[in-house]
Amino acid sequence: MTMAPSDVHPEPHSNSQQIFGLILMAVAWFGVLLQLWISLNLAHPNGKIIMAGLVKYFGFFTVITNIFVALTLSMPALAPASRIGRFFARPQVLACAAANIAFVGLAYHILLRDLWNPVGLQWLADQILHYLTPLAFCTYWLLTRSKMVSLPWWSPLAWSSYPLLYFIYSLIRGAVLGIYPYPFIDATSIGYAMALRNAFGLWFAFLLLAWLFLLLANLGVRRK
């Protein structure tokens, strides 16, 4: 009897992969919490309340996606038998996290890295969130993909709902607060038409990357 992909979970990882996953989990949470600490401390000297720092912090696709990755590493390890643990252990969820965190790193490197020059702890957080965690998590995912089921061709379309929902969230947030996290979707400065065109271009680029990840995910999969 065959099983649907969503009903099948990865086999247990080897000890080395488990250790790698635990180290990566610690690194991912460190990057996320370090950036949170920086955001809250930047809000206070500028006369802003802590809530303002939180609002700004949760406005970035980078932050939200790094939290997503940290959860995919934490929940299956800390609560493997729970519903949330089983959800984050699903091959589709892991592949979605891998494709989106890879997109974070590539988009930042191509579009944003020259727009500012972080120093000190902000530089450290920047390197962890945009380079170290994306590279390490994608490596971890590639090492464990052979123990997962084959994913259907439409998977990247499902994964793309994540950045699409973020874009909608950013537009609503920007309309309410008047601030946008990234210049290429800043509807106040460039207009909604240009923001939508930019978003469509990024969505198309994400789909190309995601289908590459799908190809990698399905190579060498051991079918049961």
Image (cartoon, helix red, strand yellow):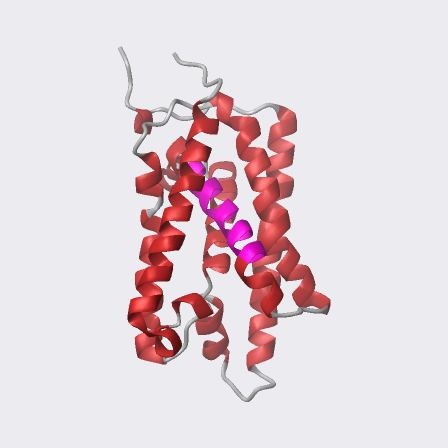
- 155 in relation to 12, above or below: below
**60 or 36, which lies in front?**
60
Q: Residue at x 39, y 67 (%)?
A: 185
Q: Which residues are magenta?
A: 94-110
Q: Is residue 38 left or right of residue 121?
A: left
Counting from the top left corner in percent of width and height, residue 195 is at 35, 66
Counting from the top left corner in percent of width and height, residue 167 is at 34, 60
Verify whether residue 105 appears in magenta. yes
Predominant SS of the magenta segment: helix
- 188 in relation to 194, above or below: below
Counting from the top left corner in percent of width and height, residue 11 is at 47, 22
Can residue 115 be seen here? The reply is: yes
Counting from the top left corner in percent of width and height, residue 97 is at 45, 43
Q: Residue at x 64, y 33 (%)?
A: 19
- 39 in relation to 223, above or below: below
**213 or 133, which lies in front?**
213
Specify the farthest residue to the right.
120
- 104 in relation to 170, above or below: above
Q: Residue at x 46, y 39 (%)?
A: 79
Q: Quadrant of the N terminus?
A: top left
**115 or 96, which lies in front?**
115
Number of marks: 0
Verify whether residue 96 appears in magenta. yes
Can residue 172 be seen here? The reply is: no
Q: Quadrant of the C terminus?
A: top left
Q: Residue at x 41, y 46 (%)?
A: 206
